[in-house]
Image (cartoon, grey):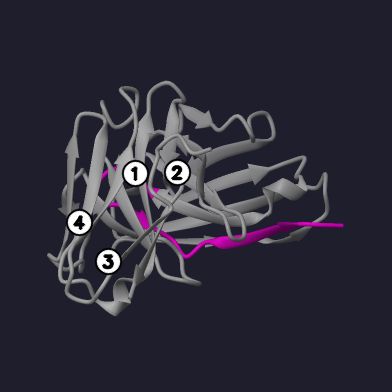
Amino acid sequence: QSVLTQPPSASGTPGQRVTISCSGSSSNIGRHTVDWYQQPPGTAPKPLMYGNNQRSSGVPDRFSGSKSGTSASLAISGLQSEDEADYYCGAWDDNLNGWVFGGGTTLTVL
Amino acid sequence: EVQVVESGGGLIQPGGSLRISCAASGFTFSGYWMHWARQAPGKGLVWVSSINNDGSRATYADSVKGRFTISRDNAKNTLYLQMNSLRAEDTAVYFCAKGGGPPAWGQGTMVTVSP
């Protein structure tokens, strides 16, 4: 059971906008910034967003992040087939004194 | 270019020891916390350990506490993870990650614990 809660799956058609949620608590998302990672099948996780809403180098502006209270969201607009991947959220947790991740969301482009 | 590259993984018997390394480049290594995370086959990401800028403070996941030791050599821009008393459940790809923004993750090094 992951400390951060994500839906196990999400889907959309090309061109659509999809959002992936990440729910935490006051000891993690409530106090610290959220990062997002993209992991296409068979590859290593790639940092996608950091500091809640900052895109990593080379990430298109179709990707955006937000945070409110103890929850965060990743939005992908203009969905493309290459966006099919697993997406993870992560944040520091003061209670565990360590990093916590969500269980991952598998995004399918129909 | 900000880069971290892991090395040192391999096949090790249960109860054995292994040290993996992470070579950093393209940023001021001594200015950042560094982390290890792992991913077992078909599973999600799990944090393993973190170390502060000068190596004076380290934290560990409960699953590895007392068995793993994180360290760093700021003169060599290198992060280490010494893994002792390895178990089958430690089998995973181990990733090195730069703390703070913008982040950097490596491609990982595979550690397989099996007889």
**Identity of the residue furthest to the left in this view:** A61
**Residue that appears at 87% across and 57% down:** B115
Same subunit, tags 2 and 3:
yes
The secondary element bearing badge 3 is classed as loop
> Which residues lie in the magenta part?
B98-115
The residue shown at (45%, 43%) is B35
Name the foreground residue: A18 vs B61. A18
Which residue sits at x=30%, y=22%?
A: A26
Quarter of the figure with residue B53: top left
Q: Where residue B5 appears, x then y in whole percent?
A: 46, 62
Mark 4 in CB contact with mark 2 (< 8 angstroms): no
Q: Tell me the residue that label 3 is attached to.
A: B1
Label 4 crowd bin: few (<14), some (14–19), many (20+), radius 10 Å: some
Tag 2 and tag 3, C-beta contact below 8 Å = no
Q: CA distance from mark 2 to mark 1?
A: 7 Å
- Is residue B109 covered in magenta? yes
Secondary structure at numbered mark 1 = loop
Gap in angstroms between the C-alphas marked 4 and 2: 27 Å
Q: Residues within 10 Å of mark 2 (few under 14, many from 20)?
A: many
Q: Which residue is mark 1?
A: B99
Direction from residue A85 to residue A12 in the image, left or right:
left
Q: Are marks 4 and 1 on the same chain?
A: no
Residue identified by numbered label 2: B35
The answer for how far apart the CA atoms under marks 4 and 1 are is 23 Å
Where is residue A53? Give x, y as percent.
16, 48
Pointers 2 and 1 in contact (C-beta within 8 Å): yes
Direction from residue B62 to residue B87 in the image, left or right: right
Q: Amino acid at mark 3?
A: Glu
| Numbered tag placed on residue A75 in the rendering | 4
Q: Nearer the N terminus, badge 1 or badge 3? A: 3
- Answer with mark 2 or mark 3, whichever residue precedes in sequence: 3
